[in-house]
Image (cartoon, rainbow, N blue to C red):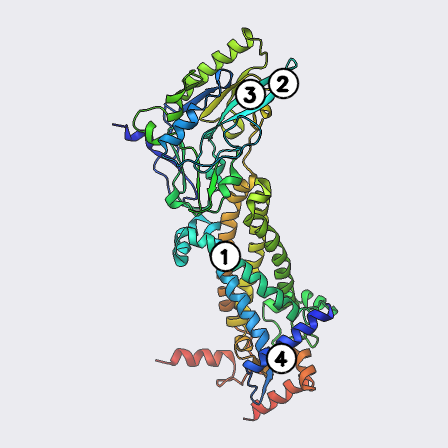
Amino acid sequence: MSTTAKKFDESARGEFARFGTTRVHPGELLRHPVYTRFLHWSVAIFFILSLLTGFAIYSPWLFRWIAPLFGGGPRTRALHPWFGLLFEVFFLFQFLNWFAPMAWVEADRRWMRRIRQYATNEDPLEAEDVGFFNAGQKLYFWAIAVSWVLFLITGLLMWFSDLTGRWIVAISYVIHDLAALLMLAGFIIHVYEGTAHQPGTFRSMMDGTVTERWALTHHPAWFRAVTGRDSREAYEREKRQLEEQ
Amino acid sequence: MANPRTFQIQEISAHPGPVPGQGTRREEQVCKYIDVTTCIGCKACEVACVEWNDHPFRETTFNDTYQTMPSTEWNYYNLIKFAEDERDGNLMWLLRKDQCMHCEDPGCLRACPADGAIIKYENGIVDFQQENCIGCGYCISGCPFDIPKFHPNTKKVYKCTLCSDRVGQGLEPACVKSCPTGCLKFGTKSDMVQIAGLRAKQLREVSGFADAGVYDPQSIGGTHVIYVLHDLKAPERYGLPATPVIPPSYTYWKWLAKPIGLGMGVLGIAAVFFHRVFYGPKLEQPEPPEIRTGPREEIEAGRKEAP
């Protein structure tokens, strides 16, 4: 990533830290600073609004249900491209913000091979080499990045259809749908993992902090990096303490 | 009074439920016959159309032809195209009255995502219902003849109605009423196809147009507006597509995508819900020790004894 983008991202983090605070209590770790949380929720809000307005137009079975939420069919159609544009803008900043930690590494390939064990909760602890983001999160991030490009190109082609012509619109329509389906699949899993499946995760995006136990459970390599303690050792010690109580 | 059965609705755009006239087929499919060989380009039909539909005067663009304007517009449904062609080294004018073709398989209706914005009547007329239109413009991309036109102020799309309001009262469309040469006729599809066939035969055998024929493209199931052309082998010379097609995005993909998308949504949510039910949460480790410990049988036994 270019240094200008990196500098911008760092100064934006600094500016947001002046207005917002993240309180880290004893036994907790800072996971997401204010700027990251702001970006994540801005992207999320406009993604959900785009998804709903888009789904109203996508399917006649949903049209009569969803369109009234946005003030009827014509307004749903009028709002959709603007919601989409705001999603595009916020995700651009999110991309700059998370580009570095989302880089694919050797540990991610190993994680992908263990994906079945991950999905069936076989190991209570994640493997030692799982860092700030696991490979599943990275995969979702890059799927969004690809969809982001597809949405932008096909969306603009359909928005300015009087300049592009009927076959361009017809092709863009299909690609726009495919990008949406890719996002939908990832979105359902993402929301589930962040709430019901992994208690203690949702607060990382709301309050910005997680417990140390959460970190050593889900991201042991990150735990080791920020605390300087060995995650397995910390786990065994915690366990002994609990058993003594 | 009109027979109410004339306007039984047969197809509704983006409609999830049943349609009153689905599958029904009237004996009398209506059709407009246009004989381009006897059109004199008087534009009476253009005026009659503007008059009947109560459209305001609009400014036109001069593009070095006798055409009123380059293309049909949201408030100008009917336009005679003046194509300059050549025959035996001489200028030949191909005068074609351009308007909605009222396709048997309408691309606009296939593309439309708004419930009830486009309907097709049992008699074959395809009509836009602007109160249901959401202004997405997909119909424009679905139409092989470039007919639906977007009105930037109302954000709705408009096109020729085949004077469904007149036809419902047993009258012919306004353009047909005004035609002084008889190159326009209106009646049942079978009658019009027969008359057109006879006229094309006459052109071939008497007038020396060996390739004369009837334009009623079967790639979209035929149309409810048919042309008699001097040269059926090259409809492009008149500005007509030889094989009009609806983009597969609005036929196969839409048919496939809707259930896939909804299925993914519903199954995806069900899958994660039951994942939680089957596998439970991933708790922060180490978990606090269980309060009740001991062999599984003991716990089970304890549970059974409870009141």
Which is more toward the observer, A234 or B120?
A: B120
Query: Marks 3 and 1, how far apart in space?
Result: 53 Å
Three-letter amino acid code at disc 4? Answer: Gly
Going from the N terminus, do you reach mark 2 or mark 1 first?
2
List the residue tagged with mark 4: A14
Which is more toward the observer, B247 or A5?
A: A5
Vertical position of residue B38 compared to residue B250: above or below: above
Q: Do the residues labelled 4 and 2 touch (CB within 8 Å)?
A: no
Q: SS of the residue at dot 2?
A: strand
Share a chain, discs 4 and 1?
Answer: no
List the residue tagged with mark 2: B86
Q: Where is residue A145 in the image (x, y as percent from the top left)?
A: 63, 61
Quadrant containing the C terminus of chain B is bottom left
Share a chain, discs 4 and 2?
Answer: no
Q: SS of the residue at dot 3?
A: strand
Q: Does residue B128 appear to the left or right of A11 in the view shown? A: left
Give the image quarter of residue B306.
bottom left
Share a chain, discs 3 and 2?
Answer: yes
Q: Residue at 43% of width from left, 27% of height from top? A: B46
| Residue A132 in view (yes/no) | no
List the residue tagged with mark 3: B94
Chain under disc 1: B
Vertical position of residue A168 compared to residue A210: above or below: above
Q: SS of the residue at dot 4?
A: helix
List the residue tagged with mark 1: B265
Query: Marks 2 and 1, how far apart in space?
Result: 58 Å
How many numbered marks are there?
4
Query: Marks 4 and 2, how far apart in space?
Result: 73 Å
- Furthest-bottom residue in this view: A244
Quadrant containing the N terminus of chain B is top left
Using a 10 Å C-alpha cutoff, classify the residue at mark 4 as few (fewer than 14 neighbours), some (14 to 19) or many (20 or more). some
Q: SS of the residue at dot 1?
A: helix
